[in-house]
Every structure is written in structure tokens, then in C-alpha cells.
Amino acid sequence: MPVEYYRDSDMLYIKLAEGTSTESEETAPGVVLDFDASNRVIGVEIEDASKFIKLSQLELRALPVADLILRERVLPGAR
């Protein structure tokens, strides 16, 4: 389940399942759910994420993690 942050648009995206989004619905201000053709939620988009979430303090808790993959995406000019 990838969690990606897009600094240029200040959007946090949580991909819950593989698939193509065929419909989206804003369920709360700035929170958009993506649905596939079977009406399953496959992703959650949080707009203006840094206003609501302390991105530097994201935590994983009580997850049955077999393989944890940590990746750092370095943006051009960020270093």
C-alpha cells in the first residue's frame, strides 16, 4: 500500500488497491475517494495535506508488516 506525497500540489495519496479509478467522490472537504469499476475504494487523496497532517511525523502502528519498504524520493534541486 503506497503512500505518496506530492509536494508541488501538497497532496497525499494512499493507494489501497491496484486498479484504475473510474469515479471519484469528495467525502469531506479536501478528502477524495477513488473508486474502480466495481465500486471498490482503491485510493484516498488528501488535498492541502500539510495543513492537516504533520507530514514529518507519520507513523505506522500495529500493522502486520512482513516486508517494509522505505524509499526516499528526492526532488530535483531539493539537495
Image (tube, helix red, strand yellow):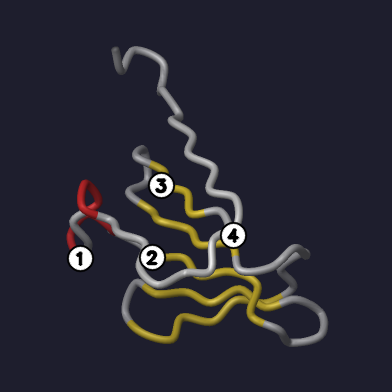
* Secondary-structure class at tag 2: strand
Q: Please name the amino acid that badge 1 sits on.
A: Phe
Q: CA distance from mark 4 to mark 3?
A: 13 Å
Q: Which residue was labeled with disc 3? A: 5
| Whether label 3 touches label 1, CB < 8 Å | no
Q: Tag 1 or tag 3, which sits nearer the N-term? A: 3
Spatial CA distance of label 1 from label 2 is 9 Å
Q: Residue 41 is drawn in which quadrant?
A: bottom right
Closest to the observer: 71 or 73? 71
Q: Residues within 10 Å of mark 3 (few under 14, many from 20)?
A: some
Circles 1 and 2: CB atoms closer than 8 Å: yes
Question: Which residue position holds label 1?
Answer: 52
Within 10 Å of the Cα at label 4, are there few (<14), some (14-19), or many (20+) other Cα atoms?
few
Residue on which the image places disc 2? 46
At label 4, the amino acid type is Met
* Quarter where residue 22 is shown: bottom right
Q: Residues within 10 Å of mark 1 (few under 14, many from 20)?
A: few
- The amino acid type, in three-letter code, at marker 3 is Tyr
Amino acid type for the residue under numbered disc 2: Ile
Label placed on residue 1: 4
Vertical side of 73 occupied by 56: above or below = below
The answer to which of 57 and 6 lies nearer the viewer is: 57
Quarter of the figure with residue 42: bottom right
